[in-house]
Every structure is written in structure tokens, then in C-alpha cells.
Image (tube, grey):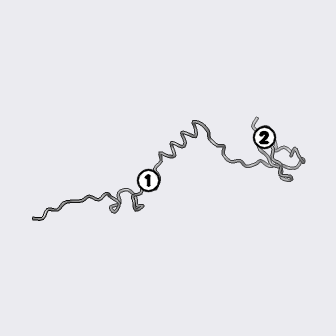
Amino acid sequence: MPTYDYRCVQCGTPFEASHAMSEPAPDCPSCGGRTEKAILVAPAMHGQMARGRELAMRSLPTARTKAGPNGHGPGCSCCAPRTTSTVKTD
């Protein structure tokens, strides 16, 4: 059975309850009041999954790595490397 996190609407007590998905929310164990499911954030990733995600994120090109020294995109004529040419005069 899945475990759900609840919070009492009346007294604010947080608690966990295991029950089938089709069952209604249980009453608060402290005051017997009405409860609602607590909204949770995504769990933190640990171990190999986190390492793979970090490597993938680092491999993506960012706007900063694509931009030239003036902040322009690749191939911009003002950001292209300048070459010096020697002109012979006789």
C-alpha cells in the first residue's frame, strides 16, 4: 500500500498514512479533524542517477559558451578571430 503525507486542516498536524488509493483521507490522529494531502516536492536524487544527470546538464551548450567575446552568436564577423596580413610596398 502506498504511504501518503497528510496535514490536518484544523490543527495543522502533519502525519503519514498507508491506505489504498481508492480510500478517502483519514481523520487527524490528534484532533479527529478533516485532513488534506500535503503537496510534496520531488525527491532528491542520490548516487549514480544524480551523477549521470549532472554530466548530462554540463554537456549541454549554454548561451554563454556559444557567444563570442561581445555576446554575439557564433560566426559573427566582429567576433571572428582577426588575422594580420602583410602588405608589401615597393
> Reading the chain from its start, which is encountered first: label 1 or label 2?
2
Q: How far is disc 1 from disc 2 in space, using C-alphas?
A: 51 Å
Q: Position of residue 43 (x, y in %)?
A: 66, 43
State which mark lies toward you, 1 or 2.
Answer: 1
* Front one among 42 and 89: 89
Identified by mark 2, the residue type is Ser
The front one of 83 and 32 is 83
Residue at image x 79%, y 46%? 6
Question: How many labels were placed on the picture?
Answer: 2
Q: Amino acid at mark 1?
A: Thr
Report which residue position mark 1 lands on. 65
Mark 2 residue crowding within 10 angstroms, few (<14) / some (14–19) / many (20+) = few
Instruction: Locate the N terminus and report the quarter of the image it occupies.
Output: top right
Determine whether 31 is above or below 73 in the image.
Answer: above
Residue 18: x %, y % from top left:
79, 38
- The vertical placement of 76 against 58, above or below, is below
**In front of the other: 47 or 32:** 47
Q: Are marks 1 and 2 in contact (CB under 8 Å)?
A: no
Q: Is residue 59 found left or right of 32 in the rendered image?
A: left
Q: Which residue is mark 2?
A: 22
